[in-house]
Image (cartoon, helix red, strand yellow):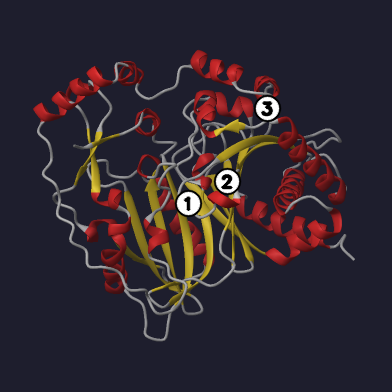
Amino acid sequence: MSDRLAPLDVSFLYLEEATTPMHVGGASVFEVPAGGFDYDRLVDLIRQRIAFVPRYRQRIRWIPGHLASPVWVDDEHFDITYHVRRSALPRPGTDAQLHDLVARIMSRPLDRNRPLWEMYLVEGLVDGRFALLTKTHHAMVDGVSAVDIGQVILDVAPQPRETPPDTWRPTPEPSGLELVAGAVGDWVRRPGAVVDAVRGGVGDVRRSAGRLAGAAGGMFAMAKTVARTAPSSPLNVEIGEARRFGTADTDLDDYKAIRKAHGGTVNDVVLATVAGALREWLMTRGEAVGGQSVIRAMVPVSVRSEEQSGSLGNRVSSYLVDLPVGEPSPVMRLHQVSYAMQAHKETGQAVGADALVGIAGFAPPTLHALGARVGSGLSRRVFNLVVTNVPGPQFPLYAAGARLLATYPVVPLAKGQAVSIGLTSYNGGVYYGLNADRDAMADVDVLAECLVGSLAELRGTVR
């Protein structure tokens, strides 16, 4: 029996538009090992590991007449070389050239007639490096099994681990009649499926409001926060199909030193750094920045307990945080952010991942993806941008002997939002990825530089 997409997952397909493709990605930079690294080696590695992510060999089949949500079926003509692609940068192979390539690739939608993922081997980077760019549709990675192909190809040692032989054989696809029969069977077992199909996966606003009202404690306070319109900002404009991409490299020890000196959490220091960077960026544009100026960020936060840390999936809440861009003192910005985050935790003013769908079309396929997908124009009325922070391992990782040097998330843009900020900590570094609308954010590299400068300003307050 084929797996049927959940209403939440199928909503990503219904709501996808040319200006807001529903895929999340990442750009990872590697050092070429002594034995070399080429396209054939990458394809062989993925062939060995793809069994760990069975969804990556399945495609979507729609039900005739849209009588029910579509189903996942094995791709009988699966061609790994279609999904794993090769590109190269012209000399000199700079990071700026890589950023331009990432922006162009991430602007293009995925082919819905095939499994919804792509990976690019990008050769020709300076200093003996290459990059892997991953691109996966949100419908592919759910909150229960949030593992993608970019994770399973990595090892903790240069020597790849042994994997069992792949014995996969595609199950024949169901006929149109079988798909209809399956849909009718689901109606009998679950009458609510009819309503889900009619709504096309888009949550009803009144039903969502009811979930918020029925939730405990801080849900009422959170609902009041959501009801407040986000402050006006040059970050909120009509966006097009083309993108720009920027990065910033920072040291995790700096965040830890600042936290130790001034209190709060590492995530608080990250948000204070972003606040300072946005303040400086606004000033470079000549925007008015008063003492009370704020930019509201949607901040997904993992709420998994230590007992759950070894399990797959994501337990995530999201906070709406007013970043104090009008505050000139970096230490005061940090204290204000810490106070706001602590208040959220103490009063329960968090939006659960499922409730978030009803507010603005969000869902938690991965931690970075949680804050990324918005299905309506409501998003820019509630918050100005998304900031996702995903802690990674603090030891080196390898792909077929190639050492991972840095990894930058590519968080999709929501409707009406000119930039998204994602960051990942890995092996002592904190790596920012800035995905931006090409026309609205010609100065995305300036914002990336402001992130480095803002952290240095905070670091300078530590004796």
Q: Residue 253 placed where, x, y %?
A: 72, 66
Circle 3 — which element? loop
Q: Residue 393 placed where, x, y %?
A: 56, 64
381 relative to 116 in the view: left or right: right
Residue in the picture at 55% in, 15% down:
210
Residue in the picture at 17% in, 27% down:
182
Q: Nearer the viewer, residue 329 or 49?
A: 49
Query: Can residue 389 be seen here?
Result: no
104 relative to 393 in the view: left or right: left
**Total labels drawn:** 3
Circle 1 — which element? loop
Residue that label 3 marks: 230
Q: Nearer the viewer, residue 51 or 329?
A: 51
Dots 1 and 2: beta carbons under 8 Å?
yes
Looking at this view, name the residue that lies furthest to the bottom. 34
Disc nearer the start of the sequence (1/3): 3
Circle 2 — which element? loop
Residue that label 1 marks: 311
Q: Is residue 272 above or below residue 363?
A: below
Which mark, by number, is residue 294?
none
Q: Is residue 292 above or below residue 336?
A: above
